[in-house]
Image (tube, rainbow, N blue to C red):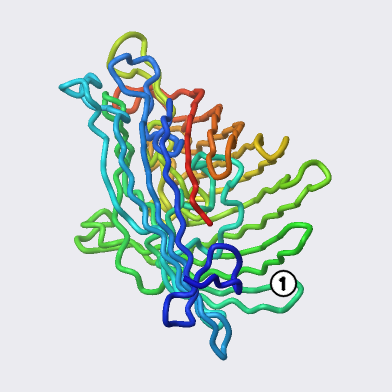
Amino acid sequence: MKICSLYGAGFYYMPGTDTCIKVGGYMRAEVNVNAGGSYAVPGTLNLDNRNAFFQDWRTRAAITVDARSQTEYGTLRSYLFISATDNQSGFTTSGTGTPGNGAATSGYNSIYAPVGFIQFAGFTAGKTDSFFDFDNNPYTNSSAYWSTGMGGNGVELFAYTAQFGNGLSASIAAQNADSSRLGIATGAVAIAAAGTTYGATQPYANQQWPDVVANLRIDQAWGSAQIAGLVHQVRAQDTGGILGAAGDHPGDETGWAVGGGLKFNLPMLGKGDYVMGAVNYAKGTIDPIAGNEGISATTGGQTVTSGYPVTSAAVGVLADAVITGGGLDLTQTMSFTAGYEHHWNSQWKTSLWGDYGKLRYSDAASAVLFPGGGSADWSLWQIGSRTVWTPVANLDLSVEVMYNSMDGANYTGAVGGLTASNENWVSGLFRVQRNFYP
């Protein structure tokens, strides 16, 4: 096969064509402690129950295919990322937390394509990162809770990017709104004694229009910067009489999100060093900001007096909106993310990173979620550090430690037998990854 030098290392001409192709990928093995796969915040975590599982063992393999050719309108590109994941162990929350035969029940096997798109003459069509994203946390192996990215999973979209020269660009995109739909709450939160939380939710109605995203971005030798906005329709299905008549529904509302981020390259501190961060705010849509939510209206941390059941828990309710007497009451979400990575030499690098986010519900929404009184507001912050050793080219061995702190909803009295609390826990991750990108 003939080497193609038009697009960088690793490309070859497909025999008999003018199309250049590059095949890459990786193989990964990891174990997570007090965290879900890829270091995600678990939906439930009972640190005092010896019968529960607090580890997630995962292997993952991925193949990438990048095909490009030149046309009179510029480069025609298609890109595909296929991944196969196997999870064993994990978390159990039902009954006493003992999964029958001593093996965890949350393992799964899956093959999926988180990325697949076509690019041509400034247009992008397919599945890839949202054009709202900026800080996708390259400084950590974790699926950071307050990331705009979705744990490596893309969103279906059609977009156009205009290049103005000198690294300045602007994009506009229509995205599948399902990627920004987390749920609409219709009633009080009920928490089972085993620790699982159930929110009384109403499904979204069918889409009338997609999410609309726009950004303005600059990429230069010093780093990059972006400002972005997203518009999202909040539209509930018929509520079945909650508002007074069977088949009724609240009026539709428009949610939105805005964000900005900066990245500075710091070669004076180390080759490859950088610092980056982002600030985001949303109303009526949580997913664009909490792209890796694992709490999902469940407890983020729990305590017990002895044995089981759980007696107190940090509860974080996730709902884009709450149906109140006034219709759809949109939830407010804000977040900060930041990280710095230092390269000690060609084999070692260490990062320090953190994030913080908070959900705010109005008094009317809190009264619906917790009729006994109190506030449904809650927040979570994380701080972590990752060290990666690359003993030979394309082999990464990494260790990461993360501290998590959740200030749960401050509801009055007990809900489902649980009292409100704040929780703190430490997570750990060990990963071995063989990259075979050319």
Where in the figure is residue 19, as x and y percent of width and height?
47, 78
**Residue 302 higher or lower than 200, as above or below:** above
Location of residue 348 (image quadrant): top right
Looking at the image, the residue that sits furthest to the left is 100
Identify which residue, 301 or 50, lies in the foreground.
50
Residue 352 lies left or right of residue 398; in this view the side is: right
Where in the figure is residue 176, as x and y percent of width and height?
40, 67
User: Where does label 1 land, which residue?
Assistant: 168
Looking at the image, the residue that sits furthest to the front is 1
Q: Is residue 62 visible?
A: yes
Q: Secondary structure at mark 1?
A: strand
**Residue 259 higher or lower than 299, as above or below:** below
Which amino acid is tagged 1? Leu
Residue in the image at 62% along x and 44% along y: 337
Residue 437 lies left or right of residue 317; in this view the side is: right
Residue in the image at 65% along x and 51% along y: 278
Q: Is residue 253 visible?
A: no
